[in-house]
Image (cartoon, rainbow, N blue to C red):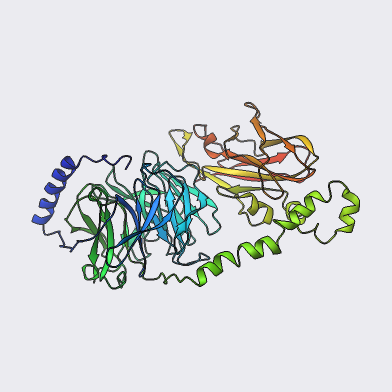
Amino acid sequence: MKTITKIKMKTRIRISLIIVMFLAAGGLLYAANRMFFANESFPTGITVSPTQLLVSQYCRPQVDQISPLGVVTPFATVPGNIGECKERYMAISPGLGTWAPTDIYLTDGTLVYKIPTLGGAGTLFATVPDCGYDHSGITFDKVGTFGFDMIVTCDNGIAARINPVGAVNEFAYQPNTALEGPLVAPLSFGPFGGQILATSDDAGKVWAISNAGTFTPAFSWGGAESVHLIPAVPCAFATTGKAFFSALQQQNEVHAFPLTDFLGFGGDIIVPSESGLGITKIHWNGSSYDQMTFDTAGGGYEGSAFVDCSIPSPTPTPTPSATFTPTPTPTATATFTPTPTATATFTPTPTATATATATSTPTPTPTPTPMGQLSKITPTGTTCNQFVNGTADTLAALNYSVSGGTIKNNVTPGVFFYWVSVTAPAGNNSFTITQTITTGNFNTLFNFTSGSNVFSSSCNSVSPTITQNPTTKAVTVMFNAPVAGTYIISIKYDSKSVAGATPPNPTTVHYDFATTGVPGSTSGLNLVKN
């Protein structure tokens, strides 16, 4: 929703009432028992555990907590401005894979913030660079078909996977499609089991997205806003007896449904409507899908959520301990980041030979990492620290598809990075990164894009100047090194640079990226047809 007054409710409600009357005549209605729960200022995103009910506001970068008695109190903030109206959605980690349980995540356009379990200021966790400005949906894969990753859907048709260290893979793209409210369906849910089900409210559709990035139209429902799995055994928020909560943004209200409304429907999905149609329920009967209207109260749903019974209660004692003691202290002290890096960088400069011999203990700490990993191609979201520490994921291939005799604009992931560790003297430096097609079956190279950078060995930016030759696509990186030492170059490339080109034959293309004058700096990447 771009503005508060976006929807023309009269038209939508007329259409909705006609459809509801038709369904009622056919006996395809279920009378759910929606009821008022709390007042909230333009509520948008909702996430619920047995002990926490959190709601994001539309025109304020703020998350509020609602008590079992409906009392609203501020809980967390993220960067932004009051009056900047955006649909920010949330999910609480169920702790599958290597995700920590009870961690809270919130989308804000291209950004995903991590919010402290007990509230406070959110911090940036990941960036989905090609996502839209608004409407980004979020969920966790609880099935395993997407590696238990976080799933983020975008207003411009992109679906992305994010792993526990914040690495982003924009793996799917459907042009001219606004995606919201994702869910990874259970394997028992017929042909669409194990796939992401995501809504498109303007089109009134639910899409199925496979882990290979294929989109399939799954269901139709006017104003489809989000997809939710009815738990096999629903549970309630605290002592309220309520199992499902929805934001009625235009009414400034949060409503709730009792646990008893969902008994006997475990494994089915429900899809609320933003356009006033109510909620539809979809059931896999073993050979086909049965769809019926579950709720006709209308009003226009925004974010909704079932109480996630698997999430444990957050407790004050373990949370600060886990956050501040193990992570910053051992990382900063035991690894090279703050102290050893400064020692290794500044000490060798004036007396490189003598210092290296006299201080052999600290020097190997920072040195082997960049030397052992001189260059690498990585997916979206990789950080300098991940490259330096050797924990960055390797991106081996981009995927493309063909339509009308040309490569479509859905190359995934949408961007990638070439990282290289270089040794530079103090003063002005210039390095050139080349790209070469070694398979000889294609001639389209990649453009670099904003987000490229040069870092010191401690991962501080040195404000480079970066340009690209429009013909050869070689990238020239210039920077002033304050001291002699190791520097990290990160070049971000636009995968969609190949869109519109005649497809290669054979269909797989291999690219090599290398830094001129830096032995061992070559890293390769394939372009592969879906």
Q: Residue at x 49, y 32 (%)?
A: 500
Q: Quadrant of residue 262?
A: bottom left
Q: Residue at x 49, y 61 (%)?
A: 147
Q: Residue at x 75, y 39 (%)?
A: 481
Left-right relation of 382 to 485? left
Does 154 appear above or below 67?
above
Left-right relation of 173 to 228? right
Of 489 and 456, nearer the camera is 456
| Position of residue 466 measured from the top left corner of the image (x, y, whole percent) | 65, 33
Of 75 and 374, nearer the camera is 75
Of 477 and 494, nearer the camera is 477
Pick the quarter of the image with the N terminus.
Answer: top left
Left-right relation of 184 to 5? right
Does 283 appear above or below 527?
below
| Position of residue 62 measured from the top left corner of the image (x, y, whole percent) | 39, 52
| Position of residue 203 measured from the top left corner of the image (x, y, whole percent) | 28, 43
> Which residue in the rendered view is the most extreme toward the top?
471
